[in-house]
Image: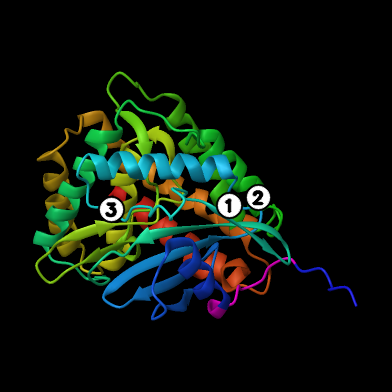
Amino acid sequence: MSHFPVTSTTLSATALREFVIEKYSLSSNTTCQLFRTGINHTYFITDKQLKYVLRVYCYNWRTKKEIEAEIDLLLLLKHNGNSISYPIVDRNNQYIHEINAPEGLRYAVLFSFAEGGKMRFMDTETCFKIGEVMGKIYQSTVDKSCNRITYNSESLLKKPYEQALQHFPVENLEMQYIKTVCDTLKRTFESIDYSKVSTGIVHLDIWYDNMSITEDNQITLFDFDFCGNGPLILDVAYFCKQLFHIENDKTEYESKKEAFLKGYQSISTLSNEEIKLIPQAAAAIWIFYLGIQSQRFDWSNVFLTENYLKLMYVTRLKSWMEYQNN
C-alpha cells in the first residue's frame, strides 16, 4: 500500500547513525541521539571522544543555496579565528547531504560540537566576553554580504505582521498594538543614516541558547540559520533585549548590558547613532520572530495561541518599549 502524505517527520536516529558512519568514515562505536526538534532537527553524534552536531533542515525551510551561503560564512569566520561551531566536510569533500524524507527532500549538515554549557544567568565578566566574541565576528563580516535575506523594514516588520495575521485577527488588541509599533519602527528604519551605521552579515539570533560557555569562560557561538544582511547593530540589540528579559533587577541588567557593550567596543566601534538604534532594532527582531512562529508553527503549538500573544509576547514587547522611553 502507498504511504499516506505527511507534512513533517522526525528521522530515525538509528538510520542517521548509519548514514553519518558511512558519509564521514566514523567508527562502529558512533552513537546518534535526537537532541531537539523545532524549525530544524538537531542530533548529537559521538564517536569515542569526538562529538559533533547533525542538523537536519526541515522540509521547505532552506534552499540548498541558502545553506551554502551559511556554510561559506562559517568557513570565513573559522578561517579568521572566530569561536564558532563550523561545518564538517565528509569523506567526499561535501558539506551538504540530501535526504529523501517522506515529506520531501531535506538537507543535513554536520557541525563541530560547541564545548561548554548553556548559561542563562551570566555575570558581567561573561557579558563582556560575549561582547568581545561578537565584536570579533563582525570584524570579519562588516561591509560583506551573503546570498541570503536582507533585514530591513520589509522583512523585519511588514512581512512578519502579515504572516501573524494568518493566525490572529486584525481586530485583536495585541495585533493592533503590534501594527502601531511596526509603523513607528518602519519610520525609524527608513530614516537610518547608513554612513553612520555599519552593515554586513548578521547572525540575528544571538542569545544564551545559541552559545556554549565553558568553566573558564570560553564562548562558542552556533546556529547561524538566520544569518543574513543588515545593520550589525541588530545582533547587539537583540542580545540586549534577551538580557533585559532575563534580568528582573534592572540595575543588574544595566550593569551587564554596559559590560557587554564595552566588550563589543573593545574590538569593534559603535557610533552614537547605532547605540540610539538599540531599542528599535531589538523590537524589530522581536516582531520578525512572531512572523517566523506564524510561518512555521500550527495551532497545536503553544507559540500560536492568543494567550501567548497577550501574556508573553506583547507583554514583553511593551515592557521593553516602555523601559526604553523612561
Q: State which mark lies toward you, 3 or 1.
A: 3
Residue 314 left/right relative to 259: right
Q: Which residue is mark 1?
A: 291
Question: x, y (%) of residue 42?
Answer: 47, 68
Q: Nearer the viewer, residue 315 or 46?
A: 46
Number of other residues with Cα within 10 Å of mark 3, as a class: few under 14, some 14 to 19, many 20 or more? many
Q: Main secondary structure of the magenta part?
A: loop
Q: CA distance from mark 3 to mark 2?
A: 32 Å
Question: x, y (%) of residue 196?
Answer: 27, 22
Residue drawn at the location 26% of the way across and 29% of the way down = 273
Q: Are marks 3 and 2 in contact (CB under 8 Å)?
A: no
Number of other residues with Cα within 10 Å of mark 1, as a class: few under 14, some 14 to 19, many 20 or more? many
Residue 6 left/right relative to 160: right
Instruction: Please provide the residue range marked out in magenta.
Output: 7-14
Q: CA distance from mark 3 to mark 1?
A: 27 Å
For the residue marked with disc 3, what is the amino acid? Ile
Residue 235 in sight in this render: yes
Residue 283 left/right relative to 276: right
Residue extending furthest top? 195
Mark 3 / mark 1, whichever is N-terminal:
3
* Residue 84's disc number: 3
Q: Secondary structure under badge 2?
A: helix
Residue extending furthest right? 1
Using the image, determine if residue 248 lies above or below residue 128: below
Mark 1 / mark 2, whichever is N-terminal:
2
* Residue 163's disc number: 2
Q: Quadrant of the N terminus?
A: bottom right
Q: How many marks?
A: 3
Q: Are marks 1 and 2 in contact (CB under 8 Å)?
A: yes
